[in-house]
Image (cartoon, rainbow, N blue to C red):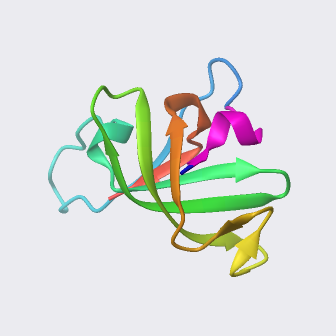
Amino acid sequence: MINAKAKGFAVRPAGEGVFFVWDSPAGQPVKDKTIRDCSNATLKLKEQKVLVEDVSTDDGQNFNGRIRGFEPARLEEFDGMAIGDQIEFDEPHVFGASD
């Protein structure tokens, strides 16, 4: 399993929040979201966004999931990682999250 911290993934600057995207029915109040509520996450390594799916956590701080892609290059592999690889990461590694 790939470890984002050991590999040198970027972390959000102090005070910067996660960008959340999700569907909300019209006319319904928007509920607060946490990464724990999401199944997809966007991490960053060098110039690439690393897109992760099937995100799960036991404690809300340490997460794991499966790499589903790299952007903007749309490569099958990047920096020793490939689509389908398992990755573990911490909450500060997450720049974006969605359902």
Q: Quadrant of residue 69 in the image? A: bottom right
Q: Nearer the viewer, residue 36 or 2?
A: 2
Q: Residue 46's x, y, as percent?
A: 84, 51
Above or below residue 12? Residue 79 is: below
Residue at image point 54% right, 65% down: 85
Where is residue 12 drawn, in percent x and y?
67, 31
Q: Is residue 97 left or right of residue 99?
A: right
Q: Residue 6, how many percent across, how many down?
A: 71, 35
Q: Is 43 displayed left or right of 34 in the figure?
A: right
Q: Is residue 52 visible?
A: yes
Q: Is residue 53 left or right of residue 95?
A: left
Question: Considering the image in quadrants, where does the C terminus appear?
Answer: bottom left
Q: Residue at x 53, y 39 (%)?
A: 89
Residue pushed farthest top?
A: 14
* Magenta span includes 7: yes
Q: Give the residues in magenta.
A: 2-11
- The answer to whether any part of residue 10 appears in the image is no
Tell me if residue 81 comes above or below residue 1 in the rendering: below
Q: Residue at x 62, y 19 (%)?
A: 15
Is 9 placed left or right of 86 in the picture? right
Q: Is residue 6 above or below residue 65?
A: above
Residue 80 x, y percent position in the rendering: 76, 63
Looking at this rendering, what residue extends furthest in the right direction? Answer: 47
Q: Is residue 96 above or below residue 74?
A: above
Q: How many marks?
A: 0
In the image, residue 98 lies in the stretch drawn in magenta: no
Asked where in the image residue 98 lies, by quadrant, the reply is bottom left
What residue is shown at x 70% (from left), y 50% (from top)?
Answer: 44
In the rendered image, which quarter is residue 83 located in?
A: bottom right
